[in-house]
Each structure stands twice: as structure tokens, then as C-alpha cells.
Image (tube, rainbow, N blue to C red):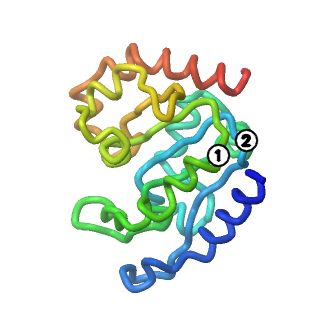
């Protein structure tokens, strides 16, 4: 029954046109993964590169995330049973004055809770301050990043965004890459049975 609900959700997400008039491009929901994925990863929104390729985190941010932070290869990351990859906004929101625009809130409100209900994962990874604020509205981003969290009774890791534009946060918090990342990587490898 749960698998049928999941498949229906995927069909509806692919057909979504809620933001059709808000973008200067055709909406294209980007997500990937199986109902029984070990890890559910939630970030802000796809980049233009991801929009064009249709492959989540197929950009500079994704390369850093996979190779440097997670230390896994592309095949492991894109294995649908390893990761279910979602975001607050499933479509590329367009270019803003500094980086990409924020995704319309209607996307997360329409789809994310249904995805959280449908995926039977072991571990959550939340990427970026926007996604963290949506899921943990009362907590500071630094507190979320530097301590293990729980979401829906499951272990949860909060990461800064690996974007090349996120230089300032990384410089102000060198202990993330120096110390915290080792623990994060260990939990990810354990969830993936590596």
C-alpha cells in the first residue's frame, strides 16, 4: 500500500504546474529516489545546471557534497536505494540578484510533508539554512549544524550548503570541515553500509 502511495506521489510531482506563472521557464520538478532509500536528503532548490540535466545536485555544489564531504562516488549517491533527494522547491526558481531566487513556499507546503510521510528512510540530511529553518523554525542554524538532531524520531544531520557562494559561512565556521564533517561522514557511511 505504501509503495502505491509513493508511486502516485511521484506521478503527481512530475506533473506539478503550481508555479507555472511564477517562473520564466517551464517548471521541472527535480527529485530522485526509492521509497525505501536509506537517506532522505532535503535542500533548498535545484540550480540551473540541475534544471537542465534533470539530475539532482549535478553541479559544483553536488560535486563538493559527494566527493569531498560525503566521500562517496556518483554511483553511490545516485543509487535510488541509497538517497531520496528532495528540496523545499522542486523546480529551479530562477536567477536572483545574488544567487538563485528563493523557491515559492507553496512547493514545500504541497509536497514535502507528503514525501516525508512516503519515504521509509533511516537518516535525514538537511542542507542549507532555508531548509533547516523550515523544518526546525525555533533553532539557530549553528546549533543545528554542530549537534545531531531528530526529525520524526529519526537521526538528522544539518549541513551548510556546499555552494561555492557559501564562502563566508565556511570561513566563519572552520570547525565544520575540520571537526564536524568527520562525524557526519561516519553516520552517512553507516547508513549506506559502507
Residue 2 on image: x %, y %:
73, 51
Residue 134's tag is none
Residue 119's tag is 1
Residue at left offset 40%, top offset 17%: 180
Please indicate whether residue 48 sits to the left or right of residue 128 in the image: right
* Vertical arrangement, residue 37 with respect to residue 111, above or below: above
- Secondary structure under badge 1? loop
Residue wearing tag 2: 36
Q: CA distance from mark 2 to mark 1?
A: 6 Å
**Which corner quadrant holds the C terminus?**
top right
Please indicate whether residue 113 sits to the left or right of residue 21 in the image: right
- Secondary structure under badge 2? loop
> Closer to the N terminus: mark 2 or mark 1?
2
Residue 27 on image: x %, y %:
51, 77
**How crowded is the residue under tag 1: few (<14 C-alpha within 10 Å), some, or many (20+)?**
many
Question: Do residues under tags 2 and 1 come within 8 Å of each other at their CB atoms?
Answer: yes
Residue at left offset 61%, top offset 77%: 15
Quarter of the image where one finds residue 176: top left
* Vertical arrangement, residue 65 with respect to residue 21, above or below: above
Residue at left offset 51%, top offset 28%: 153
Residue 134 on image: x %, y %:
34, 48
Please indicate whether residue 23 sits to the left or right of residue 124 in the image: left
In this orientation, which residue lies closer to the viewer: 124 or 185?
124
Amino acid at each position: 500500500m505504501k509503495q502505491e502511495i509513493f508511486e502516485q506521489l511521484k506521478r503527481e510531482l512530475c506533473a506539478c504546474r503550481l508555479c507555472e506563472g511564477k517562473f520564466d521557464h517551464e517548471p521541472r520538478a527535480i527529485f530522485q529516489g526509492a521509497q525505501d532509500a536509506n537517506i532522505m536528503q532535503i535542500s533548498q532548490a535545484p540550480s540551473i545546471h540541475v534544471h537542465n540535466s534533470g539530475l539532482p545536485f549535478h553541479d559544483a555544489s553536488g560535486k563538493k557534497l559527494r566527493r569531498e564531504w560525503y566521500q562517496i562516488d556518483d554511483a553511490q549517491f545516485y543509487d535510488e536505494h541509497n538517497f531520496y533527494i528532495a528540496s523545499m522547491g522542486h523546480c529551479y526558481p530562477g536567477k536572483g540578484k545574488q544567487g538563485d531566487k528563493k523557491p515559492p513556499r507553496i512547493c514545500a507546503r504541497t509536497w514535502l510533508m507528503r514525501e516525508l510521510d512516503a519515504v521509509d528512510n533511516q537518516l535525514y540530511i538537511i542542507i542549507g539554512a532555508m531548509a533547516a529553518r523550515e523544518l526546525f523554525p525555533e533553532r539557530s542554524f549553528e546549533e543545528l549544524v554542530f549537534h545531531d538532531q531528530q526529525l520524526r524520531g529519526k537521526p538528522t544531520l544539518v549541513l551548510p550548503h556546499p555552494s561555492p557562494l557559501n564562502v563566508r559561512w565556511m570561513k566563519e565556521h572552520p570547525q565544520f570541515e575540520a571537526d564536524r564533517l568527520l562525524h557526519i561522514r561516519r553516520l552517512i557511511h553507516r547508513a549506506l553500509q559502507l
